[in-house]
Amino acid sequence: MAAELEELWKKLSFTEEEDESIVLGRNTTEAAIAIGKNCLLMKVLSHRSINIDALRKNLRMVWKPNKSIQINEVENELYLVEFGDGRDKKRVMEMCPWTYEKSLILLREFEGERIPKEISLWQSPFWVQIHNLSLKSRTRETGRAIEAKLGEVLEVDVEESGVHWGKFLRVRVKIDVTKKLVRGKKIVIEGGEQRWIAFKYERLPNFCYRCGLLSHGLKDCKEGNDNEDQVDLSKLQYGAWL
């Protein structure tokens, strides 16, 4: 409907009365801006239709807010979540990623200056484990350098010394969910030999083992026509090991 209205608007010849602009002052937006501070924009990364009543019930149960939350659809597949308590909003954002029916939920801050159809949600934070690093490379600087190639680095899980001795280095990074999952990277340390480091994603939702996209599962992938039950998972480029 929005696209149809826009096309219609382009074809119109305005009358003198229609061409007169209405100027909206600050007092017309104050209430929405104030409430917007406790709001998030939300999208479920799924090709399947979403039942908004079921979505509301599920998120209230999973998020367990101290006060009420309201969820409204402001555009096709775009929702606005209004929290009664800003602390609930903060906690929900800090505990991302979330899922609904195994599909990833995308969340971002309220954008009052834009109309809903102009708003795009395409990023989500994940804790990513970096495996197969040499001991001398398990530092905050290494984590930032490597994960910066995936997206915006939010945090590197190391001690105050800047070093972490463990089975892997752990980094929180905001990734582009429209792209294929990155399974690892080739690195060269201080002019030494090239080696492969592997990534593992914590709390990874449903994704496609064939193409590596988060927007659908294997059975909904357009790159293959075979029955999911007949697929040899060992021959696919992605898997549960991610």
Image (tube, rainbow, N blue to C red):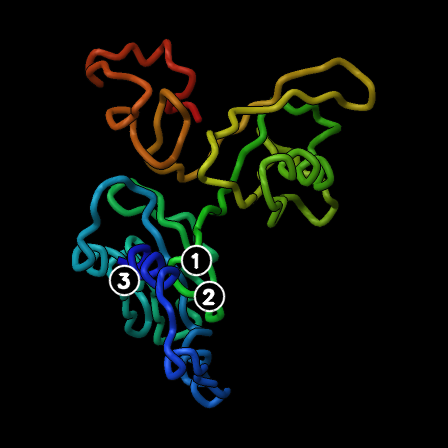
Residue name at image x 37 percent, y 24 percent = 240
Q: Quadrant of the C terminus?
A: top left
For discs 3 and 1, the disc positioned in front in the rendered view = 1
183 or 169, which is in the foreground?
Answer: 183
Q: Position of residue 16 (x, y in %)?
A: 40, 81
Q: Are marks 3 and 1 in contact (CB under 8 Å)?
A: no
Tag of residue 73: 3
**Which residue in the protein does label 2 denote?**
114
Q: Are marks 1 and 2 in contact (CB under 8 Å)?
A: yes
For discs 3 and 2, the disc positioned in front in the rendered view = 2
* Label 1 Cα crowd, 10 Å radius (few <14 / some 14-19 / many 20+): few
In this image, 143 relative to 73: left or right? right
Q: Amino acid at mark 1?
A: Glu
Q: Amino acid at mark 2?
A: Arg
Q: Are marks 3 and 2 in contact (CB under 8 Å)?
A: no
The CA span between labels 1 and 2 is 6 Å
* Label 2 Cα crowd, 10 Å radius (few <14 / some 14-19 / many 20+): few
The CA span between labels 3 and 1 is 15 Å
Q: Amino acid at mark 3?
A: Glu
Instruction: Say above or below: 21 vs 212.
Output: below
- Point out the tag, 3 or 2, that comes first from the N-terminus: 3
Numbered disc 1: secondary structure: helix
The CA span between labels 3 and 2 is 15 Å
Residue 29 occupies which quadrant of the picture?
A: bottom left
Tag of residue 118: 1
Residue 66 occupies which quadrant of the picture?
A: bottom left
- Point out the tag, 3 or 1, that comes first from the N-terminus: 3
* Label 3 Cα crowd, 10 Å radius (few <14 / some 14-19 / many 20+): some
Instruction: Say above or below: 155 vs 185.
Output: below
Q: Quadrant of the N terminus?
A: bottom left
